């Protein structure tokens, strides 16, 4: 057996919290932001209160003095002596609650974790408005350890509030005292930590982190690569996180990554960078590549590792370039998509971004042609769910397909040839209508139909306003300006014996309509409300025939049997999607 790289050390919770507060224990940058939800923190306290074990901690003795994150948001007195390798979520939870401090969450905001305790039943809950008003609860257990009141004063105040609402006899008071004492004494809860030797290298710590984190918050191959970035290229990971944070908040008069389509995560942007740098989609291969492990000799090469990271660095700079980012997002607008509600797969968006960058950097495709071909590709990929099932395998195949592409023209032709191979007459007349047999409110087919309405410059049903105007994500109101309306209202269908949601909520039974009209139609059958709107349509600038084309309304649809209406309308929706796609400089 080789030399042991760790030693076992016992801590009380109070000592751990003290060391974190002083800065002696901190997070290395191979760790992630706080991602536990409040319910999980509640369960942690419940387990500790009942005396259950809550797992080992793993620390690494720090000798570098840099590359760390402190828990909480206050300044620390000392340079960290120990870095947390495993146990971040538990220690961050415990520190945040016992000290009442905010933590940096995964969405890049700071927030507090409020856990409540009911002494009578020894029950923990996530604090909400009702619990905060309930005298049976200590609404925020952080107050117990805050030091603002002694433990005795805290208990007296709690029992005083309880007595103001109901009778509390001496026996119950004793029991409540005991329960609160037990909660207070959690600061003495014992933890066992394994401390890795300071002689362990950063790469070895990274390897340990990868090996032990098959439990807890499940890590992906992207997490493993981000771990390596933290060790060998920390600035690169920080750049990803800054970009993602900026994408969530609008700015005034300043360029930023903010947009209405996606709030990207670091691992998603990493996928785009990896595809651009290495023409790879399977991240497990990229992890080995960045570690520079020779699969035959099982040895590592620092020189090769540095070369690979340099390649990734160049690609990531292109991915995070704001001009590239926003020029790509224009391709989604060109494809008829108007916001994140219409994007059913962020993976599709990211992979299309990677192909956009490959076309721009590696093949110098004309900007106008590139926008159109990537618009076609996004529409096609979104509609068919190309990157929904086994996305890495599909993207790996697509990247392999362009390795032998030698020119801008052949790059465009290669993508269009794949589209042509799928968008056959059989697809439009059989496959797509069949895919439309669904009641799901969020499907690629429905998003593609709405995108087609935008591309066809359609107006909302019975409206003078365009669908694209009403779907504008900049419009924020108490009521959505555009709603999905049941053409055959549910209550009417119920009257004729159709009650199953999978039948009443079929995609083919919905049309986009202004919310005022949706309210006015109420539960009237179509044969009743259609004449009213036909009368209004006579004075409209749009004929009813044109409106029927856009909204895929069969002839005399209001008088059809419901099942026949659905079948005919699915075919017409598929036809409208085909026509919408044809506006994207179609390939023949």
Image (tube, helix red, strand yellow):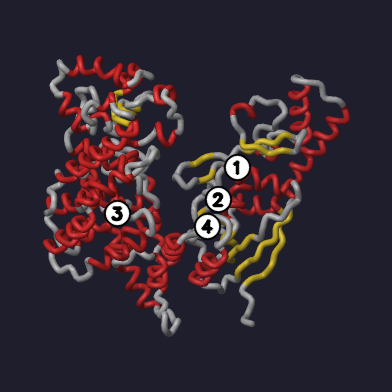
Measured Cα–Cα span from mark 2 to mark 1: 20 Å
Q: Residues within 10 Å of mark 1 (few under 14, many from 20)?
A: some
Which mark is in front, 3 or 2?
3
Q: Which residue is mark 1?
A: 39
For label 2, the SS is: loop
Using a 10 Å C-alpha cutoff, classify the residue at mark 4 as few (fewer than 14 neighbours), some (14 to 19) or many (20 or more): few
Q: Report whether residue 182 is seen.
A: yes
Instruction: Point out which mark residue 320 bears.
Output: 3
Q: Nearer the viewer, mark 4 or mark 2?
A: 4
Numbered disc 4: secondary structure: loop
For marks 4 and 3 on the same chain, the one whose residue lies earlier in the sequence = 4
Horizontal placement of 124 versus 487: left or right? right
Q: Can you tell which of label 1 and label 3 is closer to the viewer?
A: 1
- Residue drawn at x 35%, y 63% is 393
- Is label 2 or label 1 in front? 1
> Which of the 4 image quadrants contains residue 359?
bottom left
Q: Nearer the viewer, residue 46 or 62?
A: 46
> What residue would you read off at disc 4?
218
As measured in the structure, the alpha-carbon distance from the residue carrying label 3 to the one carrying label 2 is 28 Å
The residue singled out by tag 2 in the image is 71
C-alpha separation, residue under disc 1 versus residue under disc 4: 17 Å
First reached walking from the N terminus: tag 3 or tag 2: 2
Vertical comparison of 479 with 367: above or below? above
Q: Is residue 170 above or below residue 579?
A: above
* Left or right of 159 in this view: 7: left
Secondary structure beneath dot 3 equals loop
Look at 75% across and 35% down and name the residue there.
119
Q: Which corner quadrant holds the C terminus?
A: bottom left
- Res 360 visible: no
The residues tagged by marks 4 and 3 sit, at their Cα atoms, a distance apart of 27 Å
Residue 551, percent across and down? Answer: 23, 32
Residue 401 x, y percent position in the rendering: 24, 67
């Amino acid at each position: 057996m080789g030399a042991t790289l760790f030693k076992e050390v016992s801590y009380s919770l109070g000592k751990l919290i003290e060391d974190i507060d002083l800065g002696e224990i901190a997070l290395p940058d191979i760790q992630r932001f706080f991602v536990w939800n409040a319910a999980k923190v509640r369960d942690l306290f419940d387990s500790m209160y009942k005396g259950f074990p809550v797992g080992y901690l793993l620390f690494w003795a720090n000798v570098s003095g840099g590359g760390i994150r402190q828990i909480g948001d206050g300044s620390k007195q000392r340079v960290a002596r120990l870095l947390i390798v495993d146990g971040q979520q538990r220690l961050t939870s415990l520190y945040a609650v016992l000290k009442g401090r905010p933590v940096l969450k995964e969405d890049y905001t700071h927030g507090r974790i409020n856990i409540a305790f009911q002494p009578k039943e020894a029950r923990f809950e996530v604090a909400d408005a009702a619990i905060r008003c309930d005298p049976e609860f200590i609404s925020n257990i952080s107050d117990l350890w805050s030091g603002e009141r002694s433990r005795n004063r805290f208990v007296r105040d709690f029992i005083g509030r309880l007595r103001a609402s109901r009778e509390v006899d001496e026996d119950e008071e004793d029991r409540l005292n005991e329960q609160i004492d037990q909660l207070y004494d959690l600061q003495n809860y014992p933890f066992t930590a394994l401390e890795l030797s300071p002689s362990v290298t950063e790469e070895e710590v990274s390897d340990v982190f990868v090996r032990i984190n098959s439990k807890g918050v499940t890590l992906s191959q992207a997490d493993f690569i981000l771990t390596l970035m933290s060790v060998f290229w920390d600035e690169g990971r920080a750049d990803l996180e800054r970009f993602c944070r900026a994408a969530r908040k609008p700015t005034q008069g300043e360029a930023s990554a903010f947009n209405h389509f996606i709030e990207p995560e670091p691992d998603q942007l990493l996928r785009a960078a990896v595809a651009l740098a290495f023409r790879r989609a399977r991240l497990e291969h990229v992890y080995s590549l960045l570690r520079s492990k020779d699969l035959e000799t099982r040895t590592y090469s620092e020189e090769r590792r540095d070369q690979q990271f340099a390649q990734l660095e160049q690609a990531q700079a292109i991915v995070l370039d704001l001009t590239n980012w926003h020029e790509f997002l224009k391709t989604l607008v060109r494809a008829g998509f108007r916001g994140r509600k219409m994007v059913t797969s962020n993976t599709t968006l990211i992979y299309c971004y990677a192909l956009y960058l490959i076309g721009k950097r590696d093949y110098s495709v004309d900007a106008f042609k590139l926008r159109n071909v990537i618009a076609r590709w996004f529409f096609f990929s979104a509609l068919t769910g190309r990157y929904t099932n086994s996305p890495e395998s599909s993207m790996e195949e697509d990247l392999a397909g362009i390795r032998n592409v030698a020119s801008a023209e052949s790059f465009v032709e290669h993508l269009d040839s794949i589209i042509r191979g799928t968008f056959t007459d059989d697809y439009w007349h059989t496959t797509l209508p069949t895919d439309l047999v669904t009641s799901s409110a969020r499907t690629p087919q429905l998003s593609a139909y709405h995108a087609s309405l935008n591309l066809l410059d359609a107006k909302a049903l019975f409206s003078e306003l365009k669908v694209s105007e009403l779907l504008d994500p900049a419009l924020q109101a108490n009521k959505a300006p555009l709603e999905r309306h049941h053409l055959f209202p549910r209550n009417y269908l119920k009257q004729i014996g159709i009650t199953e949601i999978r039948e009443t909520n079929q995609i083919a039974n919905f049309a986009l309509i202004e919310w005022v009209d949706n309210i006015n139609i109420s539960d009237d059958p179509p044969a009743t409300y259609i004449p009213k709107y036909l009368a209004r349509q006579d004075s409209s600038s749009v004929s009813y025939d044109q409106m029927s084309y856009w909204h895929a309304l069969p002839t005399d649809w209001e008088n059809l049997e419901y099942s026949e209406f659905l079948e005919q309308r699915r075919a017409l929706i598929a036809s409208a999607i085909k026509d919408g796609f044809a506006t994207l400089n179609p390939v023949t």
